[in-house]
Image (cartoon, grey):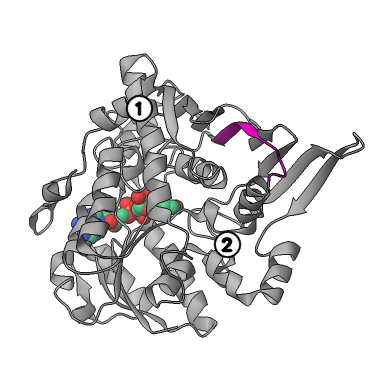
Amino acid sequence: MKETRIALIGTGMISHRHMTVIQNLQKQGYPVKVVAAAEIEPARLKAFGERYGLDEKDLYADFREMLKRDDIDEVEVCVHNNLHTSVATAVMQAGYPCYCEKPMAASYADAKIMYDTAKKTGQKLAVQISSIYNPQTRIAKKMIEEGKLGKVYHARSVGHRRQGRPGYDMPMFSHSFIDPNVGVHGPLFDLGIYHLAQMLYILGMPELESVYGFQSCDYWTDERIDKLVGRTAPVEDLGVGLARFKGGLSMDIYEDWAIHMDEIGTSFVAGKNGGLKLIDVDTTGGPLTVPEGGKIVGGGDLQLPRLEWFGIDENGIMFDNKLDCAIGDTTGQQELLMHPEMAMYNDNQLQWYSYLSGDLTDETRIDSPYIAMQTAFLSEGVVISNDLGRSVSADEIKAMAKSIALREQETPFGTIKYDFDDYQA
Ligand SMILES: NC(=O)c1ccc[n+]([C@@H]2O[C@H](COP(=O)([O-])OP(=O)(O)OC[C@H]3O[C@@H](n4cnc5c(N)ncnc54)[C@H](O)[C@@H]3O)[C@@H](O)[C@H]2O)c1
């Protein structure tokens, strides 16, 4: 692999997970190196520089100054949701490949602007979606492609947290998650991308026909916490939907980050001859995200995704096969011993660096921007349907989706103006 010189924009919570992956890759001998970082909060920027040994000259308040350097190979965007399009388009327009945090954007229109900007500028782009970089997803996708389930007629995409709103019940997380201007949406866009994107990807990116959606924010709150976290206008706490795809496939969607409930079941795929249950979908990344002697940033312990395959054999005998699918677990480790190149498919960032250095191509990498954009399309359908109180067709979503990404941002050193309207379709 060629050396990759990395710059980060935003040094909040998730930037430390990026750094953990980079440090773990360095320990394994990969030539990846962080050469610069930008952050609008001076104290946070200084602390980041001290923690990771970056010189003061490599630390920037204004990322646009950082983009004037000539020794950067790619830029990782770790700002919050409604700034993804604003900052990522600036990065690509400045001539850099861009790896962006999830969700791709806070609206479908903005995800499409990012996608189109990559095409128009000829820059490489990837979006963090940890759930699709592991054997659980690969095995499920292959089984469906090989027809092991027969015709698939329904899928369920679910995720939940019990009273786990980032920035509210979980105060260690950034308040931006529940800020309607920056986080913009609730669990459907936040955790939902992991479940929806995984489901769309394993189903072969089916074409959406219509969706009926509902969102609400009626969950328990307390004005003492409201005051503490500065909650004024809340984002949604629940997103549900029922989607219809071409070819006779339906999907129900349930994404919730505050329910008073322990279990709500798992995502699954139902086919004529078999069913697949997706257990412990990975929302934090594989073993590379685990710091030495520590916990995964924001995610606790390493997740161990599994699959359960239900079917019936040619003699009419029903079976239930349990498949270990975790990278740090038996199946994943044995697969890596036999096929070391699969490491490139087991981690977001390693796949990105492999793609940048040419070890993976447009044909062999997982097209995360396309998957993330189509996920945003479905999520946007839920939002528009909820607003209209009726189901919406794919054509209506395309026509009604609006760009809401921030065009101006107040910072301690003045206003940053973002200009990406030329990239709108
Ligand atoms: N925290 C997590 O566990 C987690 C997990 C997965 C994905 N993410 C995603 O990562 C993104 C960031 O989340 P976070 O938790 O790190 O939030 P955060 O608020 O902790 O970090 C964002 C940082 O970006 C900085 N910033 C804002 N505008 C900037 C600009 N113009 N230039 C430079 N810096 C700027 C902010 O000052 C802040 O420090 C979100 O989109 C989130 O969905 C977060």
Q: Is residue 82 left or right of residue 169?
A: left
- Specify the quadrant that holds the C terminus: top left
Figure check: 34 above or below 398: below
SS majority, magenta: strand
**Residue 152 lies in the magenta stretch:** yes
Residue 65, visible in the rendered structure: yes
- Report the Cα–Cα distance between label 1 and label 2: 31 Å
Q: Position of residue 324 (x, y in %)?
A: 74, 55
Say which amino acid is labelled 2: Gly
Image mark for residue 286 = 2
Which of 409/100 is in front? 100
Toward which corner of the image does residue 124 lie, by quadrant? bottom left
- At horizontal 73% and vertical 70% (from top left) the residue drawn is 334
Q: What span is colored magenta in the figure?
A: 147-159
Say which amino acid is labelled 1: Val
Looking at the image, tell me whether mark 1 or mark 2 is earlier in sequence order.
Answer: 2
Image mark for residue 424 = none
- At horizontal 65% and vertical 63% (from top left) the residue drawn is 327
- Residue furthest to the top: 389
Assess disc 2: are there few (<14), some (14-19) or many (≥20) residues with their C-alpha within 10 Å of its C-alpha.
many
Q: Where is residue 187 in the image (x, y as percent from the top left)?
A: 44, 36
- At horizontal 42% and vertical 25% (from top left) the residue drawn is 210
Which of 243/147 is in front? 147
**Residue 290 lies in the magenta stretch:** no
Residue beneath disc 1: 383
